[in-house]
Image: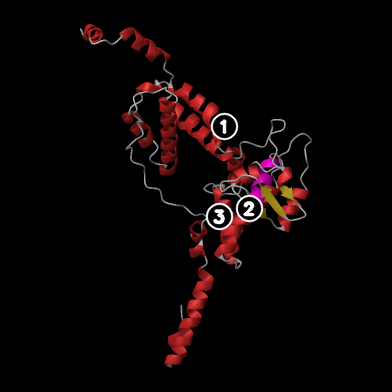
């Protein structure tokens, strides 16, 4: 009866069936999303992260569904299934939302509804992890002994020594290296073109690396003429050997900033080293410089206590 009613109202059930059959599955659309949008509009690090979200989380859960049939309930179920890793759950939700926005733009989904809307994101707790001297020594030993994956080891070493983001070292070309000036001239980064001053230890690493004819990259990959695209897998192996299973690659950048603070660099200088465009971004590290602040507080308190005429025992700070 509904079929006849739809016909009387002017709808074409046959056309609707054809449209449903022709509609892309989430797996098919995910591939188009990565090939036509991400590959052309995103930086390498973003390409990697989006590809990971699609391949590991979105396709396995929603891949067989037609994109026109995905509901908010489907999205909520996927998001809640990742609640043990809030950061990852929210990144997947973000990628999925971009996919549905593009589906509307490309005319793949025409109902004007993004099923990711109003799905509440999990609260994320910012984690700051810094290497201790002992951990740094253990990691250094592993890097020196990484004969089976020297390119990945070199990448990690340069990240430690420069404080650069992964994508900046991963896609570093020899043309960007100015040994005479002691800088890396990056034409593109998260904050745009920038010049990264580097120390002698960095230049020593770079000068000692072989240059492969026909490959412009410092960190070379298995594909001829390309850089090493997958750092995460060798990184997991390297950090496991060092007993640092919870250490993320981005933590190496945090450690660089922490060490700079402890060695006396001010926040403005550290911001320049890290390529921050906003002082607020660097200010997150201010709390790390506790020893000099404590020493200053001790000096000031002692001076005031002395002027007050307190005894030495009363002045002692524990």
In the rendering, at what x and y percent does residue 72 appear? 32, 30
Please, is residue 85 above or below residue 2 in the view? below
User: 222 or 286, which is in the foreground?
Assistant: 286
Disc on res. 81 = none
In the rendering, at what x and y percent does residue 181 appear? 74, 56
Please, is residue 293 above or below residue 9 in the view? below
Q: Which residue is under mark 3?
A: 276
Region rendered in magenta? 150-163
Q: Which residue is under mark 1?
A: 40
Q: Secondary structure at mark 3?
A: loop
Mark 1 neighbour class, 10 Å CA radius: few under 14, some 14 to 19, many 20 or more: few
Q: Is residue 131 visible?
A: no
In the rendering, at what x and y percent does residue 304 appear? 45, 87
Q: Residue furthest front?
A: 10
Q: Secondary structure at mark 2?
A: helix
Disc on res. 160 = 2
Quadrant of the image for the N terminus? top left
């Amino acid at each position: 009866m509904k079929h006849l009613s739809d016909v009387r109202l002017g709808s074409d059930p046959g056309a609707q069936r054809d449209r449903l059959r022709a509609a892309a599955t989430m797996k098919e659309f995910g591939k188009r999303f990565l090939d036509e949008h991400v590959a052309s509009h995103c930086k390498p690090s973003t390409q990697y992260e989006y590809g990971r979200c699609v391949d590991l989380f979105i396709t396995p859960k929603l891949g067989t569904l037609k994109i026109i049939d995905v509901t908010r309930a489907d999205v909520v179920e996927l998001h809640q299934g990742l609640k043990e890793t809030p950061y990852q759950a929210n990144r997947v939700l973000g990628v999925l939302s971009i996919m549905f926005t593009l589906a509307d733009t490309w005319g793949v989904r025409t109902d004007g509804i993004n099923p990711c809307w109003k799905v509440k994101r999990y609260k994320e707790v910012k984690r700051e992890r810094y290497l201790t001297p002992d951990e740094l020594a253990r990691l250094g030993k592993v890097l020196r002994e990484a004969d089976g994956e020297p390119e990945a080891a070199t990448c990690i070493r340069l990240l430690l020594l420069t404080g650069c983001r992964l994508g900046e070292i991963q896609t570093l070309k020899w043309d960007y290296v100015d040994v005479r000036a002691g800088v890396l001239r990056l034409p593109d980064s998260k904050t745009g073109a920038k010049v990264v001053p580097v120390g002698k230890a960095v230049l020593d690493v770079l000068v000692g690396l072989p240059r492969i004819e026909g490959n412009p990259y410092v960190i070379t990959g298995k594909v001829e003429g390309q850089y090493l695209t997958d750092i995460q897998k060798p990184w997991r192996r390297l950090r496991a050997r060092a007993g640092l299973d919870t250490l993320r690659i981005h933590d190496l950048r945090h450690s660089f900033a922490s060490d700079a603070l402890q060695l006396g660099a001010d926040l403005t200088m550290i911001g320049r080293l890290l390529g921050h465009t906003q002082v607020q971004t660097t200010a997150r590290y201010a709390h790390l410089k506790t020893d000099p602040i404590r020493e200053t507080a001790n000096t000031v308190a002692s001076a005031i206590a002395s002027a007050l005429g307190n005894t030495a025992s009363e002045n002692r700070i524990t």
